[in-house]
Image (cartoon, grey):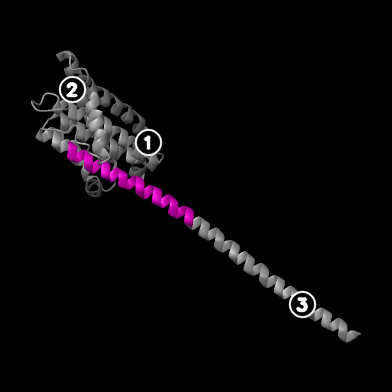
Amino acid sequence: MDQLSAQTRWERHTQRPLLALAVAFAVAYAVPIVDASAGPSVTSACTVVEWLVWGAFALDYLVRLALAPRRKEFVRRHWLDLCAVVLPMLQPLRLLRLVSTLLLVGRRARMAPQIRLTTYVVGAVIGLLMFGSLAVLSVERAAPHGNIRTLGDAVWWSFTTMTTVGYGDHAPTTGLGRMIAVGLMLSGIALLGVVTANIAAWFISRFEKDDVEERRQTEAIASLTEEVRLLRAEVARLAERQEQRR
């Protein structure tokens, strides 16, 4: 019980600092891509920030693992977190750092009870749109036959891909760019499904409330009708007795 409470306290105390680090990661990831003229010193500094943020989330996972009362069950339930921690160490690609950090941020934010589903979905959409645009721009900008050369083109492509519209005016030409497209399409479909399910659940709950209220009113009317019937019968009996006395 003490370990559980310690784990809960750790998660609550580290939630805001980790989200702030996630914002720092976003800035560090975006600067070298948006500013193509950034020097080696700026690029190196951004890379260091990215690794530090990933390291902070990896440390958070290890601490939560140490505080968990059943560590095997914790690893089994949070296997995606473990993959996000291990993946960049096996192959230190910048895109893998992006994917793993996004996974860790998403999984960590999902634990916070005060973050509602709508807020989480909106944040996920904005995050995927932004990082998908930056990732495909970093891959496709230098491609010989690429047609995604500017940030505006990348944002437009990400938006049409996430919504599964796919106008085809901009499309990735490299293998890595197409992998990003597949991930963005699947994420867009999943988020659309979550939003649709959330709206459907809201309508169903409203209909259920209306049905409950309607049944309650029907039962009240039936009860009132029965009381009126009994009163009428009682009045009729009293009137009959009065006639007999006369």
Question: Does residue 228 sit above or below 191 in this rendering?
Answer: below
Q: Which residues are magenta?
A: 181-207
Q: Earlier in the sequence, mark 2 or mark 3?
A: 2
Residue drawn at (18%, 40%) of the image:
182
On the rendered structure, is 191 left or right of 173? right
Residue 47 badge: 2
Kindly report the distance in space between the C-alpha atoms of the residues bearing marks 1 and 2: 28 Å
The residue where tag 3 is placed is 234
Please identify, in this view, whether the residue under mark 2 or under mark 3 is nearer the observer: 3
Label 1 vs label 3, nearer the camera = 3
- The answer to whether residue 201 is magenta is yes
Q: What SS does tag 3 mark? A: helix
The mark nearer the N terminus, 1 or 2, is 1
Which residue occupies 30% across, 43% down?
A: 191
Residue holding disc 1 = 12
Please, which residue is most extreme toward the left here? 144
Return the x and y of residue 42 as percentages of the image width and height: 19, 15
